[in-house]
Amino acid sequence: MNKAELIDAMSKESGLNKGDSKKALEAFVSSVTKSLKAGEKITLVGFGTFSVADRAERKGINPSTKKEIIIPSKKVAKFKAGNELSVAVN
């Protein structure tokens, strides 16, 4: 499902028009992004938890030269599904 299809689905589920559904989705994405940038965790009970984790520096191999390289540390966004979502998917 792409963004346009998600907006259509949200519109049908909520009864909102597509313009309002698009604004709601963009506000959600923006709010989650800002919170994660600030180092906060977002928990939606039953759905899941968005968080930021530190990925440590590690060794890797350049596939074209086969030389060992150092992959720098970085922060990554993570999502852990909640129990209700996990049950619904299985």
Image: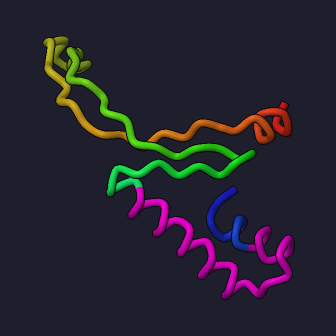
Q: Give left or right: position of 63 versus 53.
A: left
Q: Is 83 or 20 nearer to us in this picture?
A: 83
Q: Give left or right: position of 43 versus 32.
A: right
Asked if 60 appears above or below 1 in the picture, the reply is: above
- Count the numbered circles shown: 0
Asked if 51 appears above or below 86 in the picture, the reply is: below
Residue sitting at 23 percent across and 16 percent down? Answer: 60
**Image location (x, y in percent) of residue 74:** 25, 36
**Image location (x, y in percent) of residue 51:** 46, 43
**Image location (x, y in percent) of residue 23:** 59, 82
Q: Does the magenta stretch include residue 89?
A: no
For residue 22, what is the image quadrant?
A: bottom right
For residue 24, what is the image quadrant?
A: bottom right
Looking at the rendering, in which quadrant would you find the C terminus?
A: top right
**Image location (x, y in percent) of residue 33:** 42, 60
Asked if 63 appears above or below 75 in the picture, the reply is: above
Asked if 88 appears above or below 15 in the picture, the reply is: above
Looking at the rendering, in which quadrant would you find the N terminus?
A: bottom right
Q: Give left or right: position of 80 versus 51.
A: right
Residue sitting at 36 percent across and 40 percent down? Answer: 76
Color theme of the render: rainbow
Main SS class of the magenta portion in the image:
helix
For residue 5, what is the image quadrant?
A: bottom right
The range drawn in magenta is 8-35
